[in-house]
Structures are given as structure tokens and as C-alpha cells.
Image (cartoon, rainbow, N blue to C red):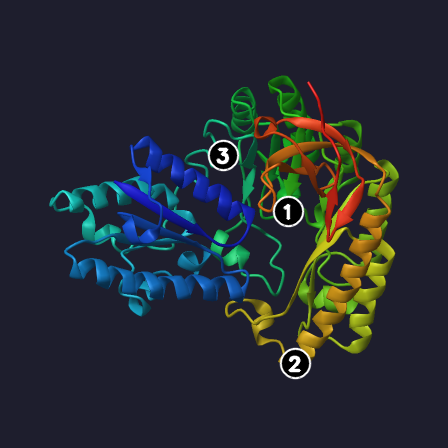
Amino acid sequence: MTYFFETYGCQMNSAESAALLLVCREKNWSAAPDGESADLVLINTCSVRNTAERRAFGRIVEYAAAKKRRAARGQSFALVVAGCTAQRLGDKLKEKYPAVDYVMGTSGRYMFPLILEAVEKAAGGEASSGGSALAQIAAGETGAVFGFSPSHFEEGKFRSLVPVMHGCDCFCSYCIVPYVRGREVSRDPRLITEEIKLVGERGVREITLLGQNVNAYNWNGGELGFAGLLRTVAGAAEESGVRWLRFLSANPRDFSTETVRVMAENGVFCRHLHLCVQHGSDRILSAMNRGYTRGQYLSLVREIRAAMPGISLSTDILVGFPGETEEDLGEVLSLMDEVRFLYAYMYHYNPMEGTAAFKLPGRIAEETKRERLSRVMALQKKHTAELLKGRIGARETVLIEGISRKNADELVTRTEKDEMVVAPGSASMIGSFAELTLCGLRGNTFRAKELSPLA
């Protein structure tokens, strides 16, 4: 039996797809080269961005047509829609797209082994004992959030994603996540450290800790908070040979001084941080229900940079929120000038039904949103170019990630500051650390003349 997965959205979705891949492999399923030839196609969806959701809907339509072509040849495959959109829409997905065989929301992932079993039985001409029930797995099903490890365990993998918590209690007014992922649930720290040690022993050298609001981690009613977890995982990482740790996504409102201290004291934490700001206007931040002010965000940035000089910062910026004025946009631009992010994920507001902001008055015209976004993007492009240019000549440690798509004799590497560097080298070096000097730039990618392997 064969499978083919398509994953949209955040790194949590990527980690969850990796977990589902493990289930397939444990049942001796193998990967298909494409969806047209697979026995099971799974689309792991995202509801946070309208564009990601629309792409997934488009793919469902394409796979519905593929099912008809396969049926004409006397063949079939099962189509599974998973993730946030499946959680949000539930049975409505099957009503709109009858070609979908299984709808598996974020809280129904524990049912995936049963789906595989049902597909196997159907392929063998057997009636599945739970067929009718499985065909409409309720989006509201409850089950173990961490029923199996979502990390990568394939041989040769040197980077891994390790979820530490699930869900979100922030209820930002524009965000659907708390409604499709549920309230915050933190993972047992013993399981986290065991997983880190396991992947480290298998050759993983970089781990990213994941959570929708990762620094809200709170185990057993306050017994262990995020700073304490970072101390614990730092020890586990160093013990098992993991050299770099990162985490996503951090909310400024939950970022403590103790977390800053732990990061500064442990070199295993990469000197890069993605710290979502979303906006620069206190009025808009309040309407977004972000839980912090512009001043508090800037104070946190100063604290982080004082503790870890040279750390690079990236962020998310949302413009065109209902009621936003030109003055509000000016506050975004001035905050960007003050912080100078290495890069940013920039987008304009799109109404998402089910969120508090969906009903807010003062929606901004599409043309205005696009024009404001273009100004934000132009300023970020300027900052990125200036910051990268100022780094030429620096000596850096890099993790070698793969072969360059443009030149088979060059390797793609990444610094701990999350900068891309291309340098000549052999494929045998992939997955190892090296030192290099940043010699020049091509676009936003550094060039280096040579790599010096590290033990």
C-alpha cells in the first residue's frame, strides 16, 4: 500500500505530517511518487491564512477529478483531509467535496491507524468494521494530543521538529487557531527529553521546539514553565550530541526575563529568534487582543539584545486590520526602523469567519491593504539588504543542509542566525557543521569560498 501527503501551513503541520508518515511506515506502507498513483492521499490543511486554505480546496478539486480518472480504469484511492480546515469545517467538507473519504481534524489524529486499516481492507475487498463511522470522523473527537511522536526518525535526518505544547489560549481577534487547535496542552517534559535524546543518538544535530504559543508552556499546573523546560532540554541536547536548539512560535506577552537568561547562558540555543509583533500601533494591538503594547515589545527586544548581542530577529507583520489608519501604519514602519528585523512574514488582513475580528467594522479596501503591504515589504527589503551587507567578512559556524539546486558542486548551509550561505563542498558533508567566512552576497544568500569541517 502507498501514500502521498501534501502539507500546508506552519511547522506544526509539518511535524504532524511527519508523525502520520511514521504511522504509515510502521504499517509497512511506502511513499508514492505522486498522488495519482497512491492508494491514499492526505492533504494536511491550514486555516490561519485564506491563501493556504484556498490552495488546499483547489487540490481537493484536482484530486476529485483524479479519482474519476482512476475509477474509469477500475482503480481507486482514499482521499483524507486533515488539519485545521478539517477541524473547522468537519462534515461540511464532505458535503461540499463528496470525493473526500475521511475528514480528520486536529483532535482526531489518533484515528489515523484505523483509517489505514479501513483502506487496506477496502483494497482487499473486505468490508471495514468501522467504515461508515470512519468516513465521517467528527472534527470534535477528543483523543491524546501527543498520541505518538511527531518527530523525524528517518535515517540520515539531521534536523528535527519536536512539539512541546499544543493549542492556544491567546484568542487574538484575527486568529482561528484556538478554535481549531483547542486550548493549550503542554507535553510531559520527560517525553520531550526522551525524544530529544533519541533523535540526537540517531544523528539529529538541530532541533526546533514547536508550539502554537510555545513559550506559554506550563506543565502540571506551574511545576515547570518554559524557562525551566529550556534548561531541561538544553541538558538533554548536549548529552545526546544535538548542537543547536530553536523554538517557534514565541508570543511577546509570555516571554519572561528568565527565558532570556536561560537562552543567554546556554550556547546550544541559536542566536536567532522569531518574535511575532503583528503591528506597531497600540490601538491596533489592543483591537487584535495581542496582550502587549508597542513599548513592551520594544523593551523586550532591548532586553534580548542586551543579553545576546548580535542575535538576529524575525517577525510577523499584519497590515490592513479593520480600523487601521495611515497613522497606525506609520507606527508599523517606525517600529520596523527601530528593531530592524532580519526578515519578516508580511501579509494583509483577510477576514476569517469564526474569529472576533470577522465582525469588526471599518474594513479596509483591498487596494488600500495591498498598497500598505507593499510599503511594509519595501522597507523590510531595505533592512534585510543592509543587515546582510554589514555581515560580509564575518566568520560563522554553519549546518550544511544540502546541495545547491543551481550548482551541484555547491552546498547550501545555514548559520545559527538563520542566514543562508552557499559554498563549494562535497555531498558527504551534508548534515555536519563547518566554519566559513561570509565573502559576498547574491540576493539574500551569502557566498563563501571554502568550508572548514568541524568535529
Label 3: how many Cα within 10 Å (few below 14, some 14–19, many 20+): many
Q: Secondary structure at mark 3?
A: loop
Label 1: how many Cα within 10 Å (few below 14, some 14–19, many 20+): many
The tag earlier along the polypeptide, 2 or 3, is: 3
The tag earlier along the polypeptide, 1 or 2, is: 1
Q: Nearer the viewer, residue 150 or 206?
A: 206
The tag earlier along the polypeptide, 1 or 3, is: 3
Q: Residue at x 63, y 79 (%)?
A: 366
Tell me, for residue 249, which label it has, or none.
1
Please tell me whether residue 276 is drawn above or below residue 22 in the rendered image: below
- Disc 1 marks a residue whose amino acid type is Ser
389 relative to 208 in the view: left or right: right
Q: Nearer the viewer, residue 396 or 351?
A: 396
Q: Secondary structure at mark 1?
A: loop
Quarter occupied by residue 85: bottom left
- Disc 2 marks a residue whose amino acid type is Glu
Q: Nearer the viewer, residue 392 or 68?
A: 392
Q: Quadrant of the C terminus?
A: top right
Quarter occupied by residue 57: bottom left
Answer yes or no: is residue 214 visible: yes
74 relative to 292 in the view: left or right: left
> Mark 1 or 2, which is nearer the eye?
2
Tell me, for residue 4, which label it has, or none.
none
Quarter occupied by residue 355: bottom right
Residue labelled with disc 3: 151
- Disc 3 marks a residue whose amino acid type is Ser
Whole-number angstrom distance, CA of label 1 to CA of label 3: 17 Å
Q: Position of residue 54 (x, y in %)?
A: 46, 66
Whole-number angstrom distance, CA of label 2 to CA of label 3: 42 Å
> Mark 1 or 3, which is nearer the eye?
3
Residue labelled with disc 2: 367
